[in-house]
Amino acid sequence: MSIFKRGRIYWYKFTFNGEAIRESTRQTNHHTARQMESAHRTSLAKGEVGIREKKTAPSLANFISQRFASWAEASTSTKTWLDYYRPGIRTIQSHKPLANLRLDEITSEKAADFAAWRQSAGLQVSSINSSLQVLRRIMRLAAQWKEIEVAPSIKMLPGERHREHVVKLEEEARYLAAAPEPLGSVAAILIDTGMRPDECYRLRWESVTWINGRNGTILVTHGKTAAARRVLPLTVRARNILQLRWETAGSPAEGWVWAAPTRSGHFEKSTLKKQHKTALRLSRVRPFVLYSLRHTFLTRLGESGCDAWTLARIAGHSSVAMSARYVHPSEDAVLAALDRLSGHNFGHNVNASEKRLAVEPLLSTSND
């Protein structure tokens, strides 16, 4: 009997009438897995079953409630579950023409119909694409878990507005002048460090050091990926803001920097929403989301001459390709780089040419 494990789950594999049979037992017990393989062999030998008949796929609604929802809540962060998966699941389940379909009945066309239904409600493209992304993840996991043979291709709608607005220096000054506290402090920290808003909200006093670097450093411990864990130097403005807040709080050794009466104990996405809206109205700057302050910082960093690898480390990007879009070398920088390369590669040739020109007249004289 050929029993083997993939992760914690036992699988079996054998050959019957020249046909390879390989299936998951979905069991973690070795003896149970052996019994299931033996029963399958016996059924084939007696002719009671053919090469495993295709099982009926569950409906999308049942698959979500019985398997996907519990997986999403247990396998992702609380923020991802609350802000991304749960709203997407509720939207999909509310559209009965899609939710009542069996998984193997869902096609690219059905997904497009779902998107059209969302568009008819006057929603933004980004909101529709968020639901489509959840649907795509559901279908891919269904294929991975062998509920369907292959996941359909689900395409996002074009025209999504990305958070790539760069706040000008003049706009920054007007916005910060109009922003009430604590929004003004948070916004200044975001634009001076390039942290993601959620990273800033989850900052703790244990992660702030006053003696490292020139003005102190902060340790980012949580983020979207493993690369998000990083140490960031503080600017003079950022240090002054944090130090004043620290002293006002009684110089605590630990605790949330941005403590709030929320379920998490710190600022959340909605905490500064009203203050931000008020600051935009009073400052009369072009509307932007707080995440745009991170994009503004990274854009300014790229324009300062920072290379993509350094920028990736500061930003906490998991790929240098993500950082490369912020780096746009000027024409002078390109010419200077080529000049340095030319001097390095061809310096000896230039010297040799100069020596040849100096020697040729002497050789000419001696031949005469």
Image: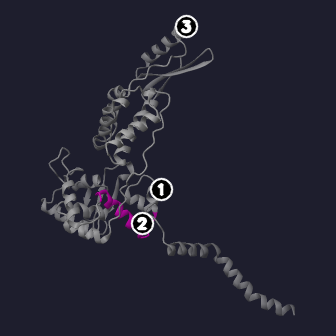
Question: Are there few (<14), some (14-19), or many (20+) residues within 10 Å of tag 3?
Answer: few
Q: Is residue 145 visible?
A: no
Residue extending furthest top? 46
* Spot occupied by residue 249 in the image (x, y as percentages of width and height): 13, 59
| Label 2 residue SS | helix
Task: Report the residue marked by disc 2.
Answer: 302
Question: Are there few (<14), some (14-19), or many (20+) residues within 10 Å of tag 1?
Answer: few
Task: Report the residue marked by disc 3.
Answer: 47
Above or below — where is 250 with respect to 33? below
* Spot occupied by residue 141 in the image (x, y as percentages of width and height): 42, 33
* Spot occupied by residue 307 in the image (x, y as percentages of width and height): 46, 65
When asked about the image quadrant of residue 311, the answer is bottom left
Q: Can residue 265 be seen in this view?
A: yes
Label located before the other in sequence (1 or 3) = 3
Q: Is most of the magenta stretch helix, strand or loop?
A: helix
Mark 1: amino acid: Ala
Give the residues drawn in magenta, as a range: 288-307
User: Between marks 1 and 3, how big is the CA–CA gap?
Assistant: 56 Å
